[in-house]
Image: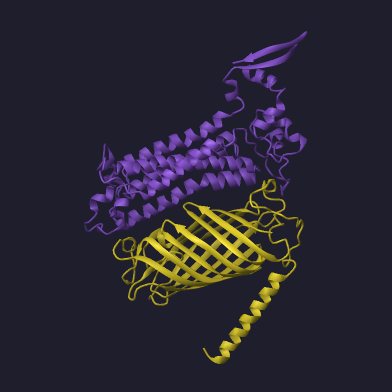
Chain colours: A purple, B yellow
Amino acid sequence: MRKALAAVLLVLPTRAVAAESGGADATSTSPQAVAPAIQPAPIQGASVASVESSAPSSAPSSAQPSALAWRWGRFSAADYVVTGTGAGITLAAAIIRPRAQHSLSGGVWFDENVRGAVRPSSLSTRYIFRDISDVGVSFAVTWPFIADALTIAWWYRGSRRVAQEMSLINLETLAVAGAIQGATNVLVSRERPYGRNCGTSQLPSDALDCEGSVHYRSFFSGHSAFSFTGAALVCIHHFKNELLGPPWDALSCAGGYTVATTTAAFRVVSDVHYASDVLTGALVGTLVGYGVPLLHYRENEAGSARSSRLQLRLVPAQGGLGVLGIF
Amino acid sequence: MSRSTLAVTLRFAGALLLAALGEVRAEQPAGERNPDPTPPLGLLPTSDDALVDPRMARSWASAPPRAFLATTVDVGFIYLRPRVSFGYGRPFTSWLGADANPIVSRGGLGGYAGARLEIPHLDLRIGPRFFSAFEHTYLQPKPSYSRLDLETSTGARAQTLTFEAELDLWLRIGPGRALLRGSGSYITGVPDGLSVFEETLRVIVDAPLVWRARLAYVFVFGAYQQHSIGPALDILDVPKREDSRTLRFGPMLRLGLSRRVEVRGSFLTTLVSPDRIGLVGGDFTELGVRYSWATE
């Protein structure tokens, strides 16, 4: 009922909603770019496809999928500040050495049991797992930009605007995750699991891994945090924008979590983190990875946010005008 | 080298340069007609960059040869490689000039500057590159290095000045293009009796010489032939190291999203090497976006 009322009431301010919703890029000049923007269906409909249809009719092939429309708020000045601050803290934390006083040493809870169960005895094998986790985090972090924003939203679905907003949200989310992870790393200064072997025959004390700047960055795992942030970004962008439609959105999300889980697990196998480090990283990555984008997707969603507060409208009534309120 | 061989080589090089200059000055790129040469393209993306740019065929290469300034910025996880180019001709297509770029990576800081000649089917660059490593040090010579040998803090941090020449030849074959790349590097700054990890080629070198050859075939697709993907094989050799042959193999990817934006990736893993240094010795150096711009 509420939805129906909203639909009725939104007939009048159609043009304004179309402009707010960002459905039409600033460059959209064709008349039909405005009217269909009130359609609640997020994608797939011809009406929405026409929203950005004034983008150059670049569809080289006739099988081009429908274009996307960005229905949420624009990335604001405050978001740029948050992103810049987060990136600055992330960079600073990567340069600053962890505190000399270590707030956490050795394993907690199940850490030592897990370590004993999964750690290969050979150093070269552990390096292989570490390399694979490096590849994993590279994919997990770049996928939301390269695959989802640029390739799917921009190239495949034809909306540079959606790609741009998604990329900026990705940047902000990763910056916040990086800042939390980096600052915690420096402050907690937990020795890595292999640290106990530094200076032994297994690991010479002059190995780079045994230097102070690397040695005491166990809590919590950046690979895990970034991978799970990336996975959350993949999921939320796919589901909110229906980038590929079912079942591909769900499969993309599952793929993101497969990469993230593997990456995190291999950090434990390669003996550079305890299980508690990667679990904390996964938790923080998930919270930030969903939390920050949801603020964007929720904030200006034409349906829910608008209807969450009292709205008053003048409507034609028998013998004059009436006032209709929705709350 | 005998005098007659030198004379023949110089004549050949002169003829090549003249032909290249003719190509740079040509009014239209070979085999390309300009559908819409209306300038300017500007610095920032415009609405025309939405979707795959329908005017992608109108690139900076469409306007007549001129003096220009161009930039490319490669961004990925985690690298940032801005490059400035200036010269005469058509940016990114047929031109003669100079390139310069800082090198900022997790491994260290450096810079490159050199001369560049690019014409259809051929790309040649020659210049020096300086690199100062954050972590890697000079290495005691060994027949084979492990990861631990490489990742040690013993000794002085490596600083090298490398003089490099690289030639790319692109040939249209069947549904794609073949790339033949040859490069030779002369590394200086390495103390006598020590070796060094060359950060760009990602191989441990007994200075001064190392060469690389790349053979690749990429399938080209897209309405504007703007995408490509295919396998690449790298062969590297260090003449002063015995059994130093390194082979890498993997895919190369390029997706042209507009005339300014490309997604690029290359993931060449090591198949054969005298060393066991893992991913550090592979060419997993590119997974990101390239943004290009040039004056008109």
Q: How many marks?
A: 0
Task: List the single residue furthest toward the top.
Answer: A319
Q: Is residue A317 left or right of residue B185?
A: right
| Horizontal and vertical percent position of residue A265 | 37, 44
At x 56%, y 88%, the residue is: B5
User: Is the N terminus of chain A in the top left, top right, bottom left or bottom right quadrant?
Assistant: top right
Residue in the foreground of this view, choosing between A152 and B82: B82
Task: List the single residue furthest toward the left.
Answer: A200
Residue in the foreground of this view, choosing between A35 and A84: A84
User: Is the C terminus of chain A in the top left, top right, bottom left or bottom right quadrant?
Assistant: top right
Q: Is residue A296 above or below residue B119?
A: above
Q: Is residue B280 left or right of residue A275?
A: right
Residue in the foreground of this view, choosing between A293 and A147: A293
| Horizontal and vertical percent position of residue B1 | 51, 88
The quadrant where residue B188 appears: bottom left
Residue A258 in view, yes or no: no
Task: List the single residue furthest toward the bottom.
Answer: B3
| Horizontal and vertical percent position of residue B18 | 67, 78
